[in-house]
Image (cartoon, rainbow, N blue to C red):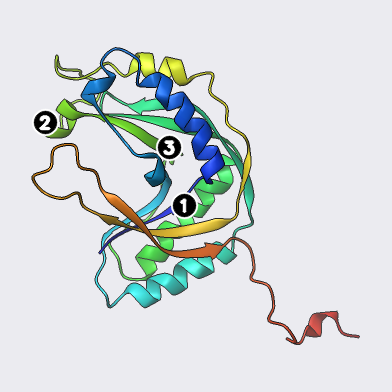
Amino acid sequence: MRLFAAVVPPMPVAGELAEAVAALRELPGADRLRWTRRHGWHFTLAFFGEVAEKPLPDLHRRLARAAHRHSAYELSLAGGGRFGHRALWAGATGDVRAMARLAATAVAAGRRAGLSMPDEHPGFTPHLTLARNNARARRGGGDPERRSDRDVDLRPYVEALAGFAGTPWTVSELALIRSHPPAPGMPGAQPHYETVALWPLGRPEPAPGARQDRDRG
């Protein structure tokens, strides 16, 4: 199964972004972009790719430990950017360093579970993908800053997002998400995302009745 670790914004926060995206979709060329769906919006922390059944239990254990090592933190959706002319995304403000640290720990969890992961997570840029260029997706490769006649210029979209600032929220969970590929032969079809597991950030609460020796005496 195709898996990745992510942070998912709550629905009210996603709703604010959806209003901004509705305005973006009125811009020239918007109908030529492949827009992502609101219910699938997320910040990818670590991409694990295709994962077999055997390492799954170990991956779950290690991601749970990773979540428990990090405290909850505050984040807001804000502004936007682009990866060349390939993709348009919404950005984040707040404790983005905490998100970067969580991403690095999630990558390490995958590597220690035996998955093929990078040794480090350099240059982490929190981004929530909003749209992709159809032409760029078909062509692939090449200079990301080189735009063909078929590509929509994403710069006006980034400019329109510059003033967007969402309501802050507390990131309190690490999600493991499965990506189901779109149905073949259906133009415009998109992946379907399924949340496989959620782990709270911070140390888990002790079980009722558990001994708290450090508080005794």
Between disc 2 and disc 1, the foreground one is 2
**How far is mark 3 from mark 2, CA to CA?**
23 Å
Which residue occupies 14% across, 18% down?
150
Determine which of the numbered discs, if any, sits on residue 127 in the image: 3
Quarter holding residue 173:
bottom right
- Number of marks drawn: 3
N-term mark: 3 or 2: 3
Q: Quadrant of the N terminus?
A: bottom left
Say which amino acid is labelled 1: Ala
**Which quadrant would the C terminus be assigned to in this image?**
bottom right
Q: Amino acid at mark 3?
A: His
Give the SS element for disc 1: helix
Asked whether the viewer can see residue 118, the reply is no
- What residue do we see at 49% from left, 38% from top? 14
- N-terminal of the pair, mark 2 or mark 1, is 1
Q: Quadrant of residue 106?
A: bottom left
> Residue 139 has which mark?
2
Instruction: Give the vertical position of 95 relative to 198 (above or below).
Output: above
Q: Seen from this angle, which residue lies furthest right?
A: 217
Query: Which label belongs to residue 103?
Result: 1
Residue 120 appears at what percent x and percent y? 40, 52
The furthest residue to the left: 185
Q: Residues within 10 Å of mark 3 (few under 14, many from 20)?
A: many
Instruction: Give the residue type at disc 2.
Output: Arg
Q: Nearer the viewer, residue 206 or 194?
A: 194
The residues tagged by marks 2 and 1 sit, at their Cα atoms, a distance apart of: 30 Å
